[in-house]
Amino acid sequence: MRNPVMEMQQIEININKAYRPKKSLISRLLAQKELQLMVIPGILLLIVFKYLPIYGLQLAFKSFDITRSIWESEWVGFQHFYEFFTSPYFGEVMRNTVGISLLKIVFTFPVPIIFALLLNEIESSKARSFVQGISYLPHFISWVVCYGLISVVISKDGGTINSILLNLGLIEEPIHFIGESKYFWPILIITDNWKEMGWGAIIYMAAISGVDPQIYESAEIDGANRLQKTIYITIPSILPTIVIMLVLRMGSILEAGFDQIFVFRNPMVGDVSNIIDTYVYDAGIKQGRYDYATAIGMFKSVVAFFMVWASNWVANKNEMGIW
């Protein structure tokens, strides 16, 4: 039933909003001065580390001379890109980078989601907080320290795993896990899961906590068990978050994990540990070829942009894209 009085009041409110003088930008900023002050450090970091370095991207198209400025160096066009694409290391570097990255997407990306779903099934909030707190502690340990801990476990001489396998009679001689190429990628996947599983689950736990408890209660009244509630309520509720994280992860398709691989690699596994980032490190830092390294970095950025755009386009087909 229509209420004429309320309709007239709403019309009056809309008229007042339409004719209310708009405040200037400075006035609005001053009214939010506390919030704006909190944003300033983030903006400065963004400008210093993201926008100012854009000036140096012209190195990718120049033959850089350390005795001259970037602007004064000679233009060489796409010479560095051509050199990289025709390099004998290009195939090996791309194979290792894409291979490790895809394996991490397949075997590492779902693990925090599964872990968050399992954590959600723990009824005691104290027990859940304790398990979650323990799980993301490895995230704060550097890969250098992690390598020291892991090498003790998988070492050929007196390593925990070799000792167990020898005592069980499963092997006759110790296995040099770190020194054999066939074990290198599995070690990367397993250790990456151990280190980042708990930290990655935080965002999914936050998404799960936003699900309305009344939906679970209604499902329970209808006779749904825990597994059914997880499949038909929890997972669909956090699916948009999963899609967004996957879209962002696809932008790192050429990021195989420099820190991890840099400390784990050695000459014996060079054929499977040489990725784009380590190749850039060798060319840019060791050989001083800053222009060549910049060109490779720009190539990575272009691929990352395309992958994010393409994956977001696919996500938008189901109305779950970022933009």
Image: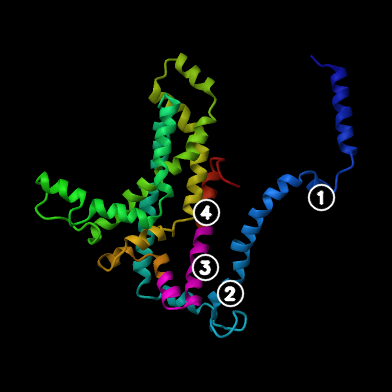
Is residue 96 shown above or below 233? below
Marks 4 and 1, how far apart in space?
A: 33 Å
Is 293 magenta? The answer is: yes
The answer to whether residue 170 of the structure is visible from this angle is no
In this rendering, which labeled residue sits more in front, label 4 or label 1? Answer: 1
Q: Which amino acid does label 3 sit on?
A: Met
Q: Quadrant of residue 254?
A: bottom left
The residue under label 3 is 298
Amino acid type, label 2 = Gln
Q: How crowded is mark 1: few (under 14 residues within 10 Å), some or many (20 or more)?
A: few
Image position of 82 (left or right of 160)? right
The residue beneath circle 4 is: 308
Q: Where is residue 130 in the image (x, y as percent from the top left)?
A: 41, 33
Report the front residue among 9 and 4: 9
For the N terminus, the image quarter is top right
Q: What residue type is labelled 4?
A: Val
Q: Does the magenta stretch include residue 125?
A: no
The residue identified by callout 2 is 58
**Residue 112: mark in rendering:** none
Measuring 45% from the left and 74% from the top, which residue is drawn there? 284
Question: Which residue range is magenta in the image?
Answer: 280-305
Separation of marks 4 and 3 at Cα, in angstroms = 15 Å
Disc nearer the start of the sequence (2/1): 1
Marks 3/2: CA–CA distance: 10 Å
Q: Is mark 3 on a helix, strand or loop?
A: helix
Label 3 neighbourhood size at 10 Å, few (<14), some (14-19), many (20+)? some
Q: Name the residue under label 1.
A: 25
Marks 2 and 4 sit apart, C-alpha to C-alpha, by: 24 Å
